[in-house]
Image (cartoon, helix red, strand yellow):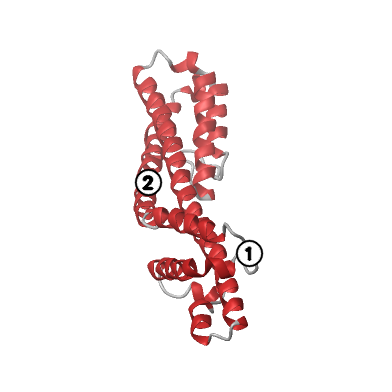
Amino acid sequence: MRSSLLRKLRMYINVQAVLLFRKNVWETSVAFTTEADDLDDHIKNINAKNQQQKGTESISKAKKQGFENMIDTTLVICGAGTAYASRIKDDGLKATFDYSESDLKKGNEKNVLDRCVIIGRNAEPLLGKLVPQYMPAEQLTVQTESIAVYAALLNAPREVRTADKSIKEEMQVLFDECDTLLNERLDRMMLAYKKTNPDFYTEYMNARYIGGWSKKKDGEEPKE
């Protein structure tokens, strides 16, 4: 959630706290109770959407880490294969493994995945030559596992991006509705308490200013 929305959410929560503390003042008003309950629901829903968004971000991070792990494990095989081919002076074999990190990462995600798979397969018949002098015995297994992990995550980002966009749009709707609730309903209804319960009114309006909202002039709603 971007910082401006976090500030706004803090303001909502501050208002919610004031309403809860002063519930004895307004709880007999059906209309006020309805709006206060609506505010509670919006805050609850915004927090839920924020948790969903954090979940999509964690999937994207896992995919990036999986990609780097696959590259790292494949580079070890490339180094071993290149060194061995150089030792036996086999230029054709050397070309099979002679990849730098930037070479491995060329092309789209599917290209990179396929390239790493091919390098691993090319190393299989040479294991007796490459292990243990050029690479660890388990290196090919480690690389195969890293490929499997990345392949499983490869389709996730598109789904994640779609889900993330949807969550952001739904969250924005909730913020817009909450702003309307405060600006057009609760702020207006609070005017009834300005004289009859000035402490409650002052606490409410102070809460409205916290979190990046500017102080209003008489007769105006607070502005972000």
Residue lying farthest to the front in this orientation: 128
Q: Residue furthest right?
A: 133
Which label number is shown at residue 83?
A: none
Disc 2 vs disc 1: which is toward the camera? 1
The residue to which callout 2 is attached is: 167
Q: Examine the rendering and report whether any part of residue 220 can be seen.
A: no
Secondary structure beneath label 2: helix
Q: Is residue 77 visible?
A: yes
Quadrant of res 76: bottom right
Q: Where's residue 61, x and y in %? A: 51, 53
Crowd band around label 1 with a 10 angstrom C-alpha radius: few (<14), some (14–19), many (20+) = few
Task: Provide residue 190's location: percent of width, then percent of height.
Answer: 45, 27
Residue at 57% x, 39% y is 210
Residue where numbered disc 1 is placed: 132
Name the side, left or right, on which 155 lies relative to 130: left
Q: Residue at x 42, y 41 (%)?
A: 52
> Taking 157 as reference, is 95 left or right?
right
Gap in angstroms between the C-alphas marked 2 and 1? 50 Å
Which kind of residue does numbered mark 2 sit on? Answer: Ile
What count of labels does the image hold?
2
The spot of residue 115 in percent (x, y) is 43, 71
Amino acid carrying mark 1 in the image: Pro
| Image coordinates for residue 8, horizontal then vertical, percent | 50, 42
Q: Earlier in the sequence, mark 2 or mark 1?
A: 1
Could you tell me which residue is drawn at 34 percent across and 49 percent down?
166
The answer to which quarter of the image holds residue 137 is bottom right
